[in-house]
Amino acid sequence: MYHRHPREGNPERSGAPEIQQESPVGVVEPDHDEPAGSEDPALAVVEAVRANTVGLLRRLPEEAWLRVGRDTGSGRYSAEDWLAIYAEHLEIHASQIDANVAAWRARPRGTT
């Protein structure tokens, strides 16, 4: 099983879907210059997942790379297709985070 990227099957979409919300970064403590919390736990999870995935990919037999499935939304789907999506996935989220942080920093002071 795999989880299809929101852009798969829709070449006219550019980037990940926008999420509409009142605050660009959620709940923050208004007296602070930076959003509350640390990114360290989230980055540790990403690092662990990527390390596990590298091991899995190295153990895949050649036949697995040659198999092709079909997704009801995007059509043909191979291991290489998944890998291409997986490779850009973090970059998409990093861009979203950068945009949210920039919006948070640009907000009028005294608002959350």
Image (spheres, rainbow, N blue to C red):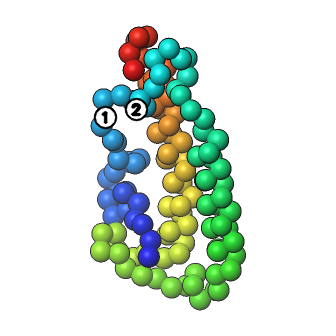
Q: Is residue 95 above or below residue 102?
A: below
Q: Residue at x 51, y 54 (%)?
A: 89
Q: Is residue 4 left or right of residue 63?
A: left
Q: Is residue 9 left or right of residue 95?
A: left
- Image quarter of the N terminus: bottom left
Would you call the spot at circle 2 few (<14 residues within 10 Å), some (14-19), or many (20 or more)? few
Contact (Cβ within 8 Å) of mark 2 with mark 1: yes
> Residue 77 appears at what percent x and percent y?
43, 75
> Residue 4 appears at what percent x and percent y?
40, 65
44 or 20: nearer the eye?
A: 44
Q: Residue at x 65, y 58 (%)?
A: 48
For mark 1, what is the residue? 21
> Residue 74 appears at what percent x and percent y?
34, 69
SS state under label 1: loop
Would you call the spot at circle 1 few (<14 residues within 10 Å), some (14-19), or many (20 or more)? few
For mark 2, what is the residue? 26
Distance between mark 2 and mark 1 Cα atoms: 8 Å
> Residue 107 appears at what percent x and percent y?
41, 17
Q: Is residue 103 above or below residue 71?
A: above
